[in-house]
Image (cartoon, rainbow, N blue to C red):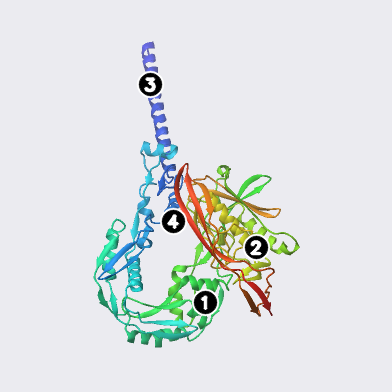
Amino acid sequence: MSDDARNASARRGKKGLLIGSGVGVVALAAAAYVGACYHYKDAIPEGTTVAGKSIGGMTSEQATRQVLTLKHPNASTKANVTAGDQSFDLAPASAWKPDAEKTLDGVTEFSLSPGRLLDQINGGGEKIEPVYSVDKTALTTLVKKAAESKIDGAPKQGRVKFIGGKVSIVDGAPGHGVDEKKVADAIASGWPKKTDYTTELVEKNSDASDNAVQAFAEGDAKKAMSAPLEVSANGQSVTLTPAQVSDVISSTTGSDGKPAIKVDTKALLTTVLSRGDKMRVPAVDAKVVWKDGQPSVVEGRSGKEIDESKVAKIVGDALVGDHKATLAMKEQKPAVMAKDVNVEALPSTSMAHFESPFPTGPSQQARIHNITTAINRLNGIVVQPGEQFSLLRALGYEFTKEAGYVEAGTLQGGLHLDGMGGGVSQVSTTMYNTAFFAGVQLDEHTAHAVYISRYPMGREATIWNPGIDNKWTNDTGKPILIKAHVESNKVVMDFYGTKKYDVATRTSGKYNIQPPKHRTVKNVKGCENTVGGGVPGFDVDVYRELKSGSTTVRTEKIHTKYKPDDIITCQN
């Protein structure tokens, strides 16, 4: 081969190599790009908000939780209905629920759009307005209740009452009312832009005839009260007397005009769970622990809980059957798994700090023990974006000897008595105030019945299992790490995270002041005589102002009514 031929062949080989290399580079770049798009497919771009609440950086699951906590923006807007020469109003907002699927449609999805990928990486999310869907059945019920309570001459509903384990009949009577479905349809299509509606008064009978009520009273109602009810869950059983059952059921009338037993699921479970401490096994969330100053994550574990959606039917069937109700259980998954916690990215800045001092001394050691036990359970918990934190759930729903608690002072029914877990309300108050100043969404809390001077007036929270919880939702868009400990004579708590709002607060003066009375209490074990002159009851209002820069986003009013802490003389 000539030198020219050899050189031409070499040039062709190099050119082919260059082309092949170029194709390889392009292929690698394309693969990396597609991989990046896939990696960010379930991550919401930073800066994305729903109704002003940040969901940037969340997964679709976290954002869904956030959306479902939203309240309708027109919650205080009423609908006014004029019927003939009468009128009534109602607040329809409770029948409108946020539709997470429609609200977040397209926010998280696989896309090869370069602009979308840049938004995912660098931010630039959009402002999303939530989509709400109306529950026509719930709205019709709202209209019906409002009309019957406010229209003069409304029909009197015939029903059965369960009192003290006995059955009694309330006779019905015809009257005037409205076509609830027609009014509900009008409100569903017009509210909140339209608030005034007109309809006619119509003659209406009781939902159930007298004969139907009588037959129900002599049949299913009588049978429901004929024997104790055995309620079982997770291998543990509790027996309720007919009198106890009568406190958690009522009668309702279906669309067919036939009365039936209505079970108040919440009231029933409160009664049952107060006596059956093994009827559920709470899930344990993954949490952060520190060893030699270095953080690591302890994995969470699943638990078992009662399936509340099935309680009413199971108990209702049992009351007209063999009086044995075995409640269905379902898995309770941890809200936070170890894989959800990136130790290297844990928040390092305290967004809220609160300290709550407590009394010390030999007589307070049991109380301090309980406070320390509860605090150790909370330290290191991570609350994910959109997650609702429940203090009862975090503490395992139990204040028992097996859970590490001892008897200490509690407040029960206006009396100062020893009880398991006494002192944990100090932890609840510390948690409430830390959440308060973190600016997160406050969902549920209950103040003590009487004012306790070591707590901030109108800004405190008790806790009791079951029934009294302390809940808040992380609506910051970023994880919150709870760090808490007992230091000398105080509970110390910090939320580490990204603060969304600055918080300002003010407290009104006391008003509606009621002096304490002198009461004699007989035969109550552990009753303590009052030392001193008791404590007056009063009302107080606390205002929380949430600010973004110089702009006030909203101002919340928390009203608390304290009963007098009466002067108690015990006679045992």
Which mark identifies residue 231? 1
In the rendered structure, which disc, 4 or 2, sits on the residue that comes first in sequence?
4
Q: Look at the numbered disc 2 and give the secondary structure of its residue.
A: loop
Are the two marked residues, 3 and 4, in contact with CB atoms closer than 8 angstroms?
Answer: no
Q: Name the residue under label 3.
A: 15
Left or right: residue 213 versus residue 367 is left
Q: Look at the numbered disc 4 and give the secondary structure of its residue.
A: loop
Tell me the crowding category of disc 4: few under 14, some 14 to 19, or many 20 or more residues within 10 angstroms, Cα based.
some
Q: Mark 4 points at which residue?
A: 69
In the rendered structure, which disc, 3 or 1, sits on the residue that comes first in sequence?
3
Q: Mark 2 points at which residue?
A: 423
In the rendered structure, which disc, 3 or 4, sits on the residue that comes first in sequence?
3
Are the two marked residues, 1 and 4, in contact with CB atoms closer than 8 angstroms?
Answer: no
Q: Which of marks 1 and 4 is in front?
A: 4
State the residue at coordinates (41%, 40%): 37
- Residue 412, located in which quarter of the rendered image? bottom right
Tell me the crowding category of disc 2: few under 14, some 14 to 19, or many 20 or more residues within 10 angstroms, Cα based.
many
Question: Quick one: 264 or 500, which is closer to the camera?
Answer: 500
Q: Distance between the residues labelled 3 and 2?
A: 81 Å
